[in-house]
Amino acid sequence: MALCTLVRRWACRHKRSNMKSLNAWLWGGILGVLLCSQFVSAIQVIPLSIEDLSHRSDLIVRASVIAKECRLDEKSRIITEVELRVSESWKGPISSGPLKIIYGGGILGDRRVRVSGQVDFQIGEEIIGFLVRGPQGQLTVIGVHQGKFQVFKSPSDGTELARSPYHGGDDAGASPLVAKNALTPSLSNRLTLSELKQRVLAAKSSTGTGGAQ
């Protein structure tokens, strides 16, 4: 209300010929607010359950990251290509040799593109990847970053655990990724790798898709 009052006073002190400028300024401000609101909505993520991830994925694998390279796609956009050495397939057929996945963003020369909320991989880490195929057959992680689970061992008892930004935690009950996300405080319980695999296979069985390899 205070803003509206100030605008009215400003308008009264200027000639009618300046009203077009005022209208342009007001609509520009409104448009800016709307664009900002749309941007905020665009980067909001709805957490998917493990079962939803399983149903929507074309391929689910246990793998190690062996290579990572940034390059330009056919539209000169920076993308990152990651090579995985697959040790198990929990859903979908796999071919021999490394599995390649891509995602938007990366560093190429002096150019750096960062996509908000995008997944990232580090060479040497072990992951469970929930993957989907694009129109040209290229693989990418489902749900921007939701389809990547880190695999690690419990420091207290050596149990293999898994965690993502929305599922799983360490022996203290919450991973650093989950603890920062206020949307999912109830999903921070410890998740063993065997439990994750069982839930994936159970979800897959309910849809009648192929078994683990």
Image (cartoon, helix red, strand yellow):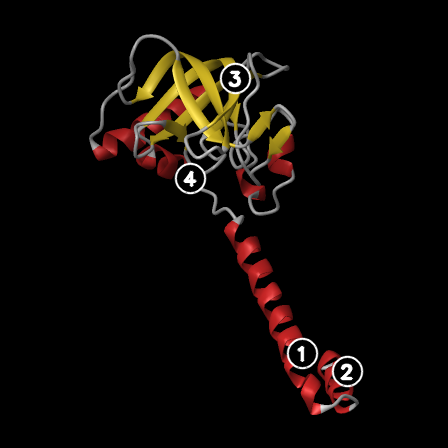
Q: Give the residue at the far front of this rendering.
A: 17
Q: Amino acid at mark 4?
A: Ser
How far apart marks 1 and 2 lie (CA) works out to 16 Å
How far apart marks 4 and 2 lie (CA) works out to 49 Å
**Residue at x 38%, y 20% (from the top left corner):** 61
Residue 152 vertical placement versus 10 (above, below)? above
**Residue at x 61%, y 64% (from the top left corner):** 32
How far apart marks 3 and 2 lie (CA) works out to 55 Å
> Is tag 4's residue or tag 2's residue first in the polypeptide sequence?
2
* Mark 3 vs 1: CB contact within 8 A: no
Residue 67 visible in the shown view: yes
Question: Which of the two residues, 72 or 46, is positioned nearer the viewer here?
Answer: 72
Q: Amino acid at mark 3?
A: Lys
Question: Which of the two residues, 55 or 36, is positioned nearer the viewer here?
Answer: 36
Residue that mark 4 sits on: 49
Give left or right: position of 107 versus 58. Answer: right
Residue that mark 1 sits on: 21
Residue that mark 3 sits on: 68
Residue 53: which numbered mark, if any? none
Residue that mark 2 sits on: 6
* Crowding at mark 2 (Cα within 10 Å: few <14, some 14-19, many 20+): few
* Crowding at mark 1 (Cα within 10 Å: few <14, some 14-19, many 20+): few
Q: Amino acid at mark 2?
A: Leu
Residue 173 visible in the shown view: no
Q: Quadrant of the N terminus?
A: bottom right
Give left or right: position of 175 versus 61. Answer: right
Question: Which of the two residues, 57 or 202, is positioned nearer the viewer here?
Answer: 57
* Mark 3 vs 2: CB contact within 8 A: no
Q: Quadrant of the C terminus?
A: top left
